[in-house]
Amino acid sequence: MKFADVIFTALQQLRENKLRSFFTLLGIIVSVTFLVAVVAIIQGMNAYVSDNLAGALIGQNTFQVRRSPIQIGLFDDEEYRRIAKRPRITKSDAAAVIAAVPQAVAISLQSGWPTPIADVMWSERTLGEVAIFGITAPYQVVQDYTFALGRPLSDVDVAQRRSVAIIGGDVADKLFEQADPIGRDIRVNGSHFTVVGVVAKKGRVLGQSFDGFVLLPLTTFESLYGRRKTTTVSVKMARAEDVATGMALADGAMRTAHRLRPGEESDYTIETADALIEFWKNLTRILFSVIPAIVGIGIVVGGIVIMNIMLMSVSERTREIGIRKAMGARSRDIRRQFLAEAIALASAGGLLGVAAGWGLAGLVSVASPLPAKVTAWSIALALGLGAGVGVLFGVYPASRAAQLDPITALRAE
C-alpha cells in the first residue's frame, strides 16, 4: 500500500468522524494552545524587559555608580548594615568619573533613594503621587529624553539653583490638559517652579508609566529636600560594547577617589541593568519548569483518549480489516494504516492547538500590557508533540489491528 494512499485513507476517516475526532483531540488542543500561548507571552516579555524596561529605568548603553546595588526585593539585615556604612556618592566622585571616562557620551549626577513623592499643583488643580528628582543637565541625555515642548534643564540652571522644572508627559496631560505648560508656575512641596520643558512620553512598560515625574536642578532639589541617602552617577557610552571599558575606568577612578587599597572591598557599586534582566530571567525559568508538567498531563490524557478511540475503531472495522487481509494486505500494511490514522489525528490536534495558541497570544497582547512573541521553536515543539503522541499511543491499536486473523475478522458482524 502506497504511503499517499495511507495518508488519504487516514484523512478520510477524520472527515467521516468529525465530531468524534474533535472531542478525541480536545486534550491535545488545549495542551498545545497553552504551550504556544504561554511561551509566546514569556518570550515576548523577556524581549520587552531587555529592550524597554532596562532602558526606561537606567538608559541604553548606560552603567551607574551607586552607593547600593540595584536590588529586586529587600536586603537582608546584614547586607543592609554593610551598605549603610558606605559613604555617599558625591559631586567629587562624579568629577572623578568624568575625568576618567572622557569618551562617555554623557555623565550625570542624580538624586537617589528615597525618592520624594509629592503633590504637584497648578492653579486650582492638584496631581498627587508624582516622583520628584534632582538632576544635573546630562541626565536628560543619559535617559534619551526628547522634548515635546520647551527646553531641557541646563548647566546654568543647576549652577544658579534656578526655580525651574521639567515635567513628564503624564503630568502635563493630567495637570494642564489643553493649556500650554511652558512658562506656568507649579507648586511642589510649598515652593514655586516655572515649567521650562515637557518630556515626550516614553509610554508604559508592563502597565507602569515612566512619564509621571518632575525634574528639578540638583542644587535646587537639595535646597528643597536636603541630600538623599543615595546619589547616583550615570554614565552613557556610545555603544553597548564600550560599556565594559567605561565601567573598568570608572572603577579605577572611584577606588582612587575613595582611597581604597588593592584587595580592599569596594564601598560602592558599579553596575548596569543586568540585575533587573537577570531577576526576570530567573522568574521565567521557574515558569518554564512548570509548563512541561502541565502540558505533559494534558498530552498524556489526550494520548490515552486517542488510544481508546483507535481501539474502538479497530473493533468497528474488524470486517474491513478481514477483507483487506483476504485481498492480500499484509500485517505491516494494516499496522501502518492505523498508525497513520493515529498520527494524523494527533497532528491535526497539534495544528488546531497552534492556531488557537497563536490567536490567544495575540488577544492577550492586544487586551493587556503583556507582550507576546510566538517563536518558531514553540510551534515546532507543539507539532512534534502532536505527531509524537500519535506514534506513542497509536502503536498498540495498530498492532492489535495487524494481529487480527482474517478468517475471524471476516466472520465479524
Image: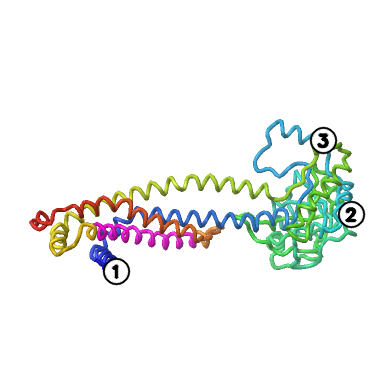
Residue extending furthest toward the right:
160
Dot 1 corresponds to which residue? 4
Secondary structure state at the residue bearing disc 1: helix
Name which residue type carries label 1.
Ala
Dot 3 corresponds to which residue? 264
Residue depth check, mark 1 versus mark 2: number of the one nearer the observer: 1
Percent position of residue 180, x then y: 75, 68
Q: Do the residues labelled 2 and 3 touch (CB within 8 Å)?
A: no
If you read the primary sequence from the N terminus, does the residue marked by circle 1 or circle 2 appear first? 1
User: Which one is in front, 273 or 296?
Assistant: 296
Name which residue type carries label 3.
Glu
Q: How many labels does the image show?
A: 3
Residue depth check, mark 3 versus mark 1: number of the one nearer the observer: 1
Image side of residue 404 versus residue 102, left or right: left
Percent position of residue 240, x then y: 73, 58
Q: Give me the disc on residue 258.
A: none
If you read the primary sequence from the N terminus, does the residue marked by circle 3 or circle 1 appear first? 1
Answer whether residue 167 is magenta in the image: no
Secondary structure state at the residue bearing disc 2: loop
Which residue appears at 30% of the width and 51% of the height? Answer: 393
If you read the primary sequence from the N terminus, does the residue marked by circle 2 or circle 3 appear first? 2
Name which residue type carries label 2.
Arg
User: Which one is in front, 32 or 161?
Assistant: 32
Dot 2 corresponds to which residue? 161
Which residue appears at 69% of the width and 63% of the height? Answer: 201
Q: Do the residues labelled 1 and 2 touch (CB within 8 Å)?
A: no
Answer whether residue 341 is magenta in the image: yes
Calculate the distance from the C-alpha at mark 1 to the C-alpha at mark 2. 83 Å
Image side of residue 214 versus residue 10, left or right: right
The residue segment tinted magenta is 335-363
Residue extending furthest toward the top:
78
